[in-house]
Amino acid sequence: MPTPLLRPAAGLAVALLLHAGPARCDDLLTLLTENAAPASMREHGQVTGRETDKIRALMARTGTPYRLDVLPWKRAYHMAQTQPATCVYSTSRTPEREALFKWVGPTDQADWVFYGRLDHSFPLRTLEDARPLRIGTYNGDARDDYLRSRGFQVEATTNDLANPEKLLLKRIDLWAVGMRPGSPGPDRPAWKGVIGPLLVFHQVQVYLACNRTVPDRLVDKLNMAAADLRRDGTFGKIERRYAHWQPAP
């Protein structure tokens, strides 16, 4: 179920959010995200995470009422395209997607990295070297769209963590991963010494992507607030809070 309607007040601390009174339908945004810790996740019934906290701060700075929900990525992305007053984060902004949304941000950036078996025998110095290889992706993800549209051999799954298992079994040659620059990236004890990053093949910025019906005046207001939050260090403080995040045992 979606979380309750929230109407943050300007200057309110990110962690403290108030329930709102009635709002006009055209003022209310539905904000959707996926379970992708630590960027976005549901903990103890609350939608939280590094990018979620940035979005909450953005709504608070502009006094925009909103609802939050966590859904499978493909569903959330489709709803943001088709339902009025709906946005989805964190969405990679690519040329293929440019005309599909109105964009707020950027809120972060990402490296797109090929992971593979460390005992591989194929050369991999550029993206073009990957053309004859089998690449595991996540269905509906920007990396899948990017590689598929350029004619690469893409094998999409509905669960991204199926890809490292396929690497271990040599059913694919590469796994296309999105990660923050400088971060250690995905890791599991079973992968140690077997699977690791091989090549950064692209870099993108990520945004809050809004349905085309969201008024330009609101998009402009949110973009100005995002610039202020970057400039005054609010986004940086949020990022530092999650710098050493670890999942609960």
Image: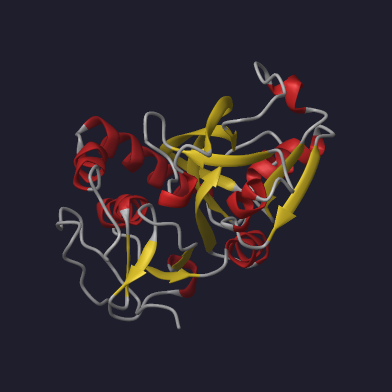
Q: Quadrant of residue 153?
A: top right
How many discs appear? 0
Q: In which quarter of the image is residue 186?
A: top left
Q: Quadrant of residue 118?
A: top right
On screen, 172 above or below 94? Answer: below
Task: Identify the coloring.
Answer: secondary structure
Q: Residue at x 15, y 58 (%)?
A: 12
On screen, 227 above or below 83? Answer: above
| Quadrant in which the C terminus is drawn | bottom left
Q: Residue at x 55, y 56 (%)?
A: 214
In the image, residue 84 lies at what x, y percent?
Answer: 60, 66
On screen, 165 above or below 126? Answer: below
Q: Tell which of 41 and 116 is nearer to you.
A: 116
Q: Tell which of 236 and 29 is nearer to you.
A: 236
Residue that extends furthest to the bottom in the rendered view of this protein: 1
Q: In this view, does 109 lie to the left or right of 246?
A: right
In the image, residue 58 lies at what x, y percent?
Answer: 32, 50
Q: Tell which of 152 and 123 is nearer to you.
A: 123
Residue that extends furthest to the top in the rendered view of this protein: 125
In the image, residue 183 lies at what x, y percent?
Answer: 37, 35
In the image, residue 203 lies at what x, y percent?
Answer: 54, 28
Q: In this view, does 14 lie to the left or right of 58?
A: left
Q: Which residue is drawn at 41% across and 69% down?
A: 68
Q: Which residue is drawn at 53% across and 39% down?
A: 194
Q: In this view, does 71 lie to the left or right of 122?
A: left
Q: In this view, does 10 lie to the left or right of 103?
A: left
| Quadrant in which the N terminus is drawn | bottom left
